[in-house]
Image (cartoon, helix red, strand yellow):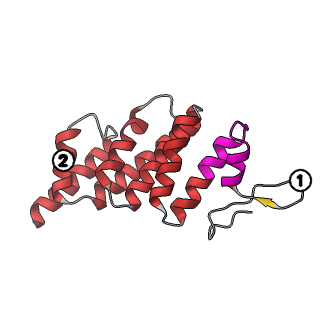
Amino acid sequence: MCHFASAKCSITRDVCGRPTTLQEFLAKFPRSRLAPDAAYLRSLSLLHLKRYTEARGGLEEAQRTYPNARLQASFILTLAKVSVAEEQYIRALDELHGLTAARQIPADVQQEARALSIDIVGSKLTPAELETVKRRWPVEFPSDYILLRLAREAWSRRAHSG
């Protein structure tokens, strides 16, 4: 059972029966087949606790340490969620860029990345940030037609209101 209030999720018990936290587990068993999942869950816990700097650091370290393709995609998606929580929307879109267009990304992660992109473009960006998005990704990103349509509608609304 995970206790978010401490960001130390118990996933196992040591030989004396004491709970072992994810951080302790990673320190003791960095090469365990469970280590990538433990690193990911620890970062999710830190994101939930709004400890964004620690969450980002843990995710970036996990990206360097664990090459599993599925987890890499989840690490990137969660990094984008950290950026959104920090209200760094352009950074989040940068992080999501590869996920929405790549072919070898798991479909569920790709769909969640698209949904997050739609939310950012449709409701989070300032007019200046929308202009940045238009300049940086005029056609290729967001590549999804729905996202592009929503972006155009948002640009139009902001242009008429501002």
Residue 141 forms part of the magenta stretch: no
Above or below for 32 versus 92: above
Q: Which of 147 and 17 is in front in this view?
A: 17
User: Is residue 33 positioned above or below 92 on the image?
Assistant: above
* Residue 1: quarter of image: bottom right
Residue drawn 55% across the image and 41% down it: 62
Kindly report the distance in space between the C-alpha atoms of the residues bearing marks 1 and 2.
55 Å
Q: Residue at x 57, y 36 (%)?
A: 65
Residue for badge 1: 15
Labelled pair 1, 2 in contact (Cβ < 8 Å): no
Say which amino acid is labelled 1.
Answer: Val
Give above or below for 81 relative to 99: below
Magenta extent = 23-41
Q: Name the residue under label 2.
A: 132
Lateral position of residue 6 relative to residue 28, left or right: left
Measured along the vertical axis of the image, is residue 135 above or below residue 47?
above
Residue plotted at (66% across, 62% down):
8
Ranked by sequence position, the earlier of labels 1 and 2 is 1
Q: Could you tell me which residue is drawn at 44 percent across and 54 percent down?
A: 81
Check disc 2: other Cα within 10 Å, few if <14, some if 14-19, many if 20+: some
Please provide percent x and percent y for residue 87. Answer: 33, 61
